[in-house]
């Protein structure tokens, strides 16, 4: 009986070996040849595996940045910026979508230095101003646009009646960070939301202490912290931020690259996706 020349068997043989497959007397020799071919294939696969696992000789493992170093985003924020408020939830989404650590940092804006200042009464009438016509147009457009964007997200932004000093609230940010991520996020969200509804006075140390307590922090040491070391820490972070080019919020730093404005979050997402 002659053996069928099954292509699944003969595919790896050359033309001189195929007739032997049809000769029963040569069957034993053919099996030996097939065994040798399989052994050669296993040897080749092992060599390929060793090649793929080999580290490049030009890069030492100790020189490579760790995942944590590659996946940390520094976020500079200030509670009196509506743009920072609008970026807040979008930054949280980075943590949801990528293995990334967000390092929230306070940056206290000096709004009068670039937009002038003004104070309104309860009816919205201007009672004090140091602002030229160009600055007024910028301010009015900015708040109109921020409210437009806020409505899309179900947020409330009411224009403030004066230029607020956010020092105490930003000291509260640093204080809350020391109490853990859950406390920090509750404090952070509470201050942003209530301030922009005009429901929270960020210049009142008692109010900020209350927001900390509500978030789950122990506020006992906040009064002393905000009067001394907290302000010094806030100033130091601001000076360090300006040394790398930060001038506004929200600002983001990833892998040493600086971005200003939430419109650059898609660029940051792209960078994080490439590094994952």
Image: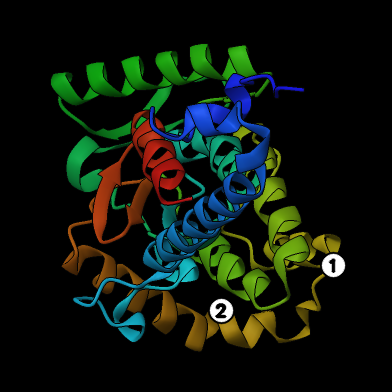
Q: Residue at x 27, y 71 (%)?
A: 56
Q: Residues within 10 Å of mark 1 (few under 14, many from 20)?
A: some
Quadrant housing residue 183:
bottom right
Q: Which residue is mark 1?
A: 216
Q: Is residue 165 left or right of residue 140?
A: right
Q: Is residue 115 left or right of residue 197?
A: left
Q: Nearer the viewer, mark 2 or mark 1?
A: 1
Q: Quadrant of the N terminus?
A: top right
Q: Residue at x 49, y 69 (%)?
A: 68
In percent of width and height, residue 123 lies at 56, 19
Q: Residue at x 67, y 70 (%)?
A: 176
Please say if 91 is above or below 146.
Answer: below
Q: Residue at x 64, y 35 (%)?
A: 198
Please say if 262 is above or below 250.
Answer: above
In percent of width and height, residue 120 lies at 45, 29
Q: Nearer the viewer, residue 243 or 276?
A: 276
Marks 2 and 1, how far apart at CA: 18 Å
Q: Nearer the viewer, residue 6 or 243?
A: 6
In percent of width and height, residue 222 lies at 67, 80
Q: Which residue is mark 2?
A: 226
Quadrant housing residue 150:
top right
Residue 160 visible within the image: no
Decide which of tag 2 and tag 1 comes sooner along the chain: 1
Q: Which mark is residue 272?
A: none
Q: How many dots with numbers? A: 2
In percent of width and height, residue 85 lies at 53, 38
Q: Is residue 58 left or right of residue 123?
A: left
Residue 19 visible within the image: yes
Q: Nearer the viewer, residue 68 or 252?
A: 68
Q: Secondary structure at mark 1?
A: loop
């Amino acid at each position: 009986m002659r053996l069928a020349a099954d292509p699944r068997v003969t595919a790896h043989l050359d033309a001189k070996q195929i007739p032997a497959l049809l000769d029963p007397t040569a069957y034993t020799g053919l099996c030996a040849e097939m065994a040798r071919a399989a052994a050669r294939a296993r040897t080749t696969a092992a060599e390929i595996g060793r090649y793929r696992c080999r580290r490049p000789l030009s890069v030492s493992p100790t020189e490579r940045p760790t995942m944590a170093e590659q996946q940390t985003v520094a976020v500079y924020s200030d509670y009196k910026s509506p743009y920072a408020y609008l970026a807040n939830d979008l930054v949280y989404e980075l943590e949801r979508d990528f293995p990334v650590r967000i390092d929230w940092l306070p940056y206290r804006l000096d709004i009068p230095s670039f937009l002038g200042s003004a104070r309104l009464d309860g009816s919205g009438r201007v009672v004090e101003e140091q602002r030229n016509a160009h600055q007024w147009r910028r301010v009015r457009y900015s708040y109109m646009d921020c409210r437009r964007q806020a409505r899309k997200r179900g947020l409330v932004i009411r224009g403030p009646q004066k230029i607020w000093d956010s020092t105490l609230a930003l000291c509260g940010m640093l204080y809350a960070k020391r109490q853990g991520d859950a406390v920090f996020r509750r404090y952070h969200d509470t201050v942003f939301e209530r301030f922009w509804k005009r429901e929270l006075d960020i210049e009142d140390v008692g109010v900020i202490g209350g927001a900390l307590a509500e978030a789950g922090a122990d506020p006992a040491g906040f009064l002393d912290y905000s009067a001394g070391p907290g302000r010094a820490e806030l100033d130091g972070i601001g000076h360090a931020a300006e040394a790398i080019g930060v001038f506004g919020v929200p600002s983001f730093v990833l892998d040493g690259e600086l971005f200003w404005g939430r419109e650059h979050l898609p660029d940051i997402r792209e960078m994080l996706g490439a590094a994952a």
